[in-house]
Image: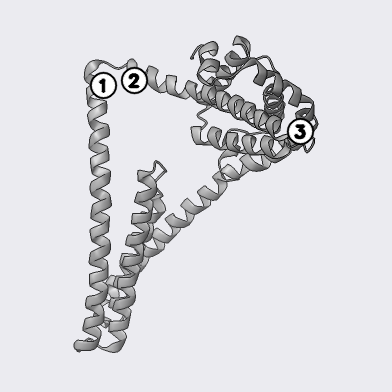
Amino acid sequence: MLLYRDLKEDYQFTEEEADILHKLQPRMEALAEKFISEFYDYIWGFGKTAQFLKNKDIISHHRIKIKQWFLNLFCGDYDLTYFTNLYKIGEIHVKIGLPTHYVNSAFTFTRTFIIKNSVDEKVDKKQRIAELAAIEKIIDMNLDVLTSSYREEELGKFLSLSGFEKTILIGLKKFNSYINLFLAIALAFVAIFSISLFGYDIYLLFYSDIGVEKGILTILGSLLVLWAAIELIHEEIKHLQGKIFDIGTFIMLAMAALIRKVLIYSLSAEKSHELIIIGGVIVALAAAYWLIGRQDKKSTH
């Protein structure tokens, strides 16, 4: 962890600002319960909070610690003990596998809550600016120390590797980025070809003896494929941004392709056997998609 004196110096955090925060503490103590209530409403919206706050005892203990941390933001004494305790909190977050974006998001809420509720009409503009500067700095320093645990955990794992392992790891990361880029470009081509297929089906509808009924069903099938391709591109964009890829999108793509075949084969009496097989596969895929969606809903509660 960065030495706390260096941390305060880098943020240009002064004793005057520490005193300003300490003077805000009585006001924040009166708001502590409101903060806790709104804070929990906020973090339950993350989706997977229940994985970390599994029962009433853990929640009760967590509420006490969060309230204590909130009030300590305005303790006025930001010494080695203060920042060491923060670092230990960060280590606990790393240990339980709490995603860093949950921490960052929680700090955004905290910052907004404090700024919104620290307004005092009796305070002049100059003093208000000084208060806001002190609040911003102490929150940013807290976030810096907490997330440093994640950085040091990742650095420790990397440094423990041999030179050969580091070379392999770096090479694999670069290769993975190239593969993701290739996949994004390939999906763009798929979308273009899907549009071309849609246009070709319209052409056949008007300039061939394919028949109106079969032509319309073929066009609908092409639209399904195009829609699935767009969904895949959307998921790949999220994946490139560091989010988890939704496997359900692949299932939707497979279902769209099979439904297109069903629409085409439904007009042919000779394809009844293939229709039964494809129908069974679609039912299986639909069941898999439903199970995945159900599991996702459970994880959000």
> Residue at coordinates 58% horizontally, 19% vertically from top-left?
13
Q: Is residue 202 left or right of residue 284?
A: left
x, y (%) of residue 100? 49, 32
User: Dividing the picture into quarters, in which one does residue 142 lie?
Assistant: top right
Specify whether residue 58 is in view.
no
Q: Cα distance, mark 1 to mark 3?
A: 56 Å
Q: Are marks 2 and 1 in contact (CB under 8 Å)?
A: yes
- Tell me the element at label 3: loop
Which numbered disc, 2 or 1, marks the residue that appears first in the sequence?
2
Q: Which residue is mark 1?
A: 166
Q: Which residue is mark 3?
A: 123
Of residues 188 and 197, which is closer to you in this image?
188
Q: Is residue 152 left or right of residue 195?
A: right
Q: Which residue is mark 2?
A: 158
Q: Cα distance, mark 2 to mark 1?
A: 7 Å
Mark whose residue sits in front, 1 or 3: 3
Type of the residue with mark 2: Phe
> Residue at coordinates 76% horizontally, 37% vertically from top-left?
34
Vertical relation: 286 (above or below) 212: above
Q: Cα distance, mark 2 to mark 3?
A: 50 Å
